[in-house]
Image (cartoon, rainbow, N blue to C red):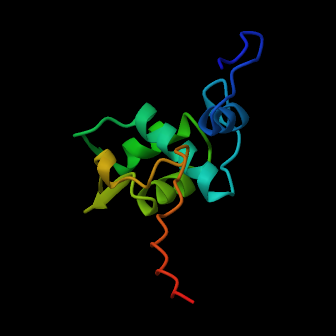
Amino acid sequence: MSRPESLPRRHTLREKVLHAFVVDGRLVSIPARERKRHIVLQWLTTTDLEPDREYSERDVDMRLALRHRDVASLRRYLVESRYLSRAGGIYRRRPEADWPADPDADVAAPARPASPESPEE
């Protein structure tokens, strides 16, 4: 059975979060909930930071300042959440394989172990 054409498309969590927290390309606030914050951090990383490039702290701050005034918190969250690495005052975008699991992905329940066979009565 197919979905009727008149039903609107359901928005993903990522779309909902970015719609709520990003207005005209600027972050209106930093989400308090970790899952939503990860969506915003992932958006910032993919939008403003190029892979395989080194950034000074000043460069990172200038890029983040275009999105939100609290650059220190954003920079700290990006490093703590493993979107950026920092060594010797140099920042680099980490490979996507190192990033936290996609917050918008449906997380499947872990497989349950097979129940032991019930003893015969």
- Residue at image x 49%, y 39%? 44
Residue at far front of view: 121
Q: Residue at x 64, y 39 (%)?
A: 13
In what quadrant of the picture does the N terminus appear?
A: top right
Vertical order, 94 against 25 (above or below): below
Q: Residue furthest right?
A: 6
Residue situated in front as seen by the camera: 39 or 103: 103
Seen at 24% across and 40% down, the residue is: 53
Which residue of the protein is positioned furthest toward the left in this rendering?
A: 52
Question: Where in the figure is residue 9, as x and y percent of width and height?
Answer: 69, 21
Quadrant in which the C terminus is drawn: bottom right
The residue shown at (70%, 39%) is: 28
Give how far across and how far down residue 41 sits, in percent: 51, 46
Left or right: residue 14 versus residue 88 is: right
55 or 12: nearer the viewer? 12
Q: Position of residue 77 (x, y in %)?
A: 51, 58
The one of 65 and 46 positioned closer to us in this rendering: 46
Q: Is residue 81 visible?
A: yes
Q: Is residue 26 above or below residue 94?
A: above
User: Can residue 92 be seen from the camera position used here?
Assistant: no
Q: Is residue 85 above or below residue 11?
A: below
